[in-house]
Structures are given as structure tokens and as C-alpha cells.
Image (cartoon, helix red, strand yellow):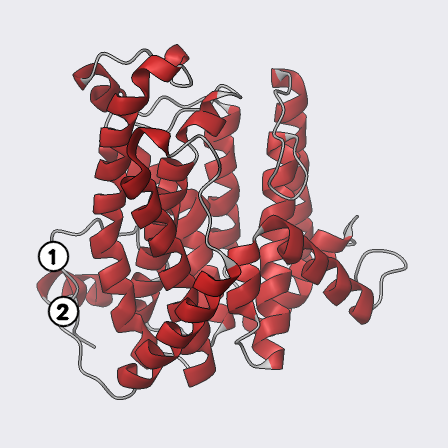
Amino acid sequence: MSAVGVNDQQLLDHATRSIAVGSKSFAAASRLFDPATRRSAVMLYAWCRHCDDVIDGQEAGHSATVIGQDEVNQRLAGLVAQTHAVYAGLAVENEAFAAFREVVIEHQIQETYALEHLSGFAMDVQQRRYESIEDTLDYCYHVAGVVGLMMAQVMGASDERTLDRACDLGMGFQLTNIARDIVEDASVGRCYLPRAWLAEFSIPQQGLDQIQYRDSLAVLARRLVNMAEPFYASAQAGLTALPWRSAWAVATASGVYREIGINVSKRGANAWDTRVSTSKLDKVRLVLAGLWRAVISRGRQWPPRPADLWQRPLHGCSATHHAVRAADPEAE
């Protein structure tokens, strides 16, 4: 069952509008998928975008507003209830959840992943404090790493090694996003920088958007961008397991987001004067670079995933599989 009065074309139109407004970077990359994969990818994006907008009181990822605690708690509870309804086969109330239902049925998206994504929003609702970089990485996993896992399932991936690399890409994306949006997030009371880092530069959390701290924030943003690099490098190894058009789309999205991080670093203290993005000409260049990366990934043997790189939690794996991974992360 879908939302009342919504047909398949309306679902696709809704999802396409959502991605066009919410993420021009991912919208450009999504056009490179084959039609069936593109449909599922944009529908999954529409659900993620909807959940984020509901919690942040924004529209298509823009103009977030401060919402009262009781109201935001009710909104989160509603998202959780609707997600449970999807997996229980019950009626859903809006186009975003109807789109998500189609993706869940078509690609057997694990309910654990969906609920973990919502628990990332719960961290915002509960105003979690990020004391260390490990806390920040945990947040990155829930709001983006797990989206990489779901997107990988949409592209037909199921083995744990490929899922590891998909998660790594999401981690790189989110570290880049945090660096780009430090001041914007601070304006609505959000801070994902570790408190230990802020203390290192004597930056008060309530003063992140004040101009006198821009030089110090530039150092911390550069640190985040540098942390993203090994995640992007690891994600490259996952391309070989994807259909070539999916590999092209993923390589392009990776290139676009990575370049955003590089530009944040280059701008230094001026990184937050205007929102960092990539131009149309840049996107064309990165689409071509993504094609080359996808082509050279075919049949290539990649080195093992770095043992010291942050590791996602594992779900649904046998005890034997866990033991094998612990001994050799690249083993079958």
C-alpha cells in the first residue's frame, strides 16, 4: 500500500523534485545511474531528505529553524512510527514514505539501517554533546554512513567488504558537510565539532558563529577535511563491485563532495562567507573524472581496507564471519 491517491509516476516526480532542490551535487551524479537504479536512488534520497527536514524544521535542506523540544520529540516519534509501518506493511501518510516503501520492497533494505539513520536524528533531538572525535564519527555513521549502506543495497551490493566501502563514502561525505556547515549549524544551536577540539583553541560552543573565531575554525575544518581523505580513498575500492554505471555515479558524487572539502580548506577563514559548492563547469569536469575512475576500477584488485580506519558496527553477520573479518578484513 502507498500513500492514498499517489501513483508510481507521482512518487518519482516527488523524489526527483526533492533531490533537485535538496542536493544539486547528488542530483547531477544520480543522472548517471541506469533508469531503474536512478529511480530507487532518488526515492531513497527523498525519504532521507524528508526525515532531515522534519527534524530541522527546514525545506529541502535549507533555512533550518529552531523547534521546541516537545515538538521535535513528537516529530521524531512520528518518523519512527511511519518507518515501522513501512516494514509492517501498513498504510503510510505521505509521498516520502511511500517512495521509501517501494525501495524497501524492491531492494530488501534492512530495517536496522533505516532505524539507525533515524537514531542519528535522535542525536540532534536530544542535543547530544560530542566530547571526542569518536563521538563525531558515530554521528557521521548514523546520518550518512548508514545511508551509504542503503544506497549500496540499491545498487545490488550485499557482501560486507563492499558495504564497508559504501559506509566509508558516507563518512567522507558527512565529515565534509560538517566542515562546510560549521557556522550555519551553529546559527541553529548545532555543533558537531568535538568539545576537546574546541577546548584546544579556546572556542566557546556558543560562539562558533562569531567572526573572531574564524581563523581557529579554519584549522578545525581543515582537520575534518583531512580526516575525510582516507574514507574517500577507501570508498574508491568499492567501485569494482558495482555495475559500471553505478560505479560512474558513485565516483562522480565522491569527486564532487571531495572537491567541496578541498575548497573549504583553501578558503580558510573565509570558508563561511558564502556556501561552498561546485560550479556547473566543475561538475562536468568531475563527471568525466568519475567516468575515468569507474573505467579503471573494472576488475582491479585493491589493497585491504586500512586496519586503523574507523569501522562501522556490523549487523546480521554470523559469529564465524565476524571472526574472519577480525583476522582478515578482506577475506571472503
Q: Could you say which quadrant of the image residue 19 lies in? A: bottom right
Q: Secondary structure at mark 1?
A: loop
Residue lying furthest right? 5
Horizontal arrangement in the rendering, residue 6 relative to residue 146 (left or right): right
What amino acid is labelled 2 in the image?
Pro
Check contact, mark 2 vs mark 1: CB within 8 A.
yes
Q: Could you say which quadrant of the image residue 265 lies in? A: top left
Residue drawn at x 64%, y 20% as measured from the top left: 67
Q: Secondary structure at mark 2?
A: loop
Residue drawn at x 21%, y 15% as measured from the top left: 199
Residue drawn at x 51%, y 20% as measured from the top left: 187
Note whether 268 is above or below 42 in the view shown.
above
The local crowd at label 1, few if under 14, some if 14 to 19, many if 20 or more residues have their Cα within 10 Å, is few
Q: Nearer the viewer, residue 226 or 211?
A: 211
Residue 280 percent across, percent down from the top left: 52, 61
Asked whether residue 80 is in view, the answer is no
What amino acid is labelled 1 in the image?
Ala
Residue drawn at x 30%, y 68% as measured from the top left: 160
Residue 60 percent across, percent down from the top left: 65, 44
Q: Circle 2 sits on which residue?
A: 304
Residue lying furthest left? 327
Q: Nearer the viewer, residue 190 or 22?
A: 22
Note whether 242 is above or below 6 in the view shown.
below
Quadrant showing the N terminus: bottom right
**Residue 38: mark in rendering:** none
Give the alpha-carbon distance from disc 2 to disc 1, as whole Å: 8 Å
Q: Circle 1 sits on which residue?
A: 307
How many numbered marks, from 0 up? 2
Quadrant showing the C terminus: bottom left
Note whether 212 is above or below 83 in the view shown.
above
Residue 268 percent across, percent down from the top left: 29, 34
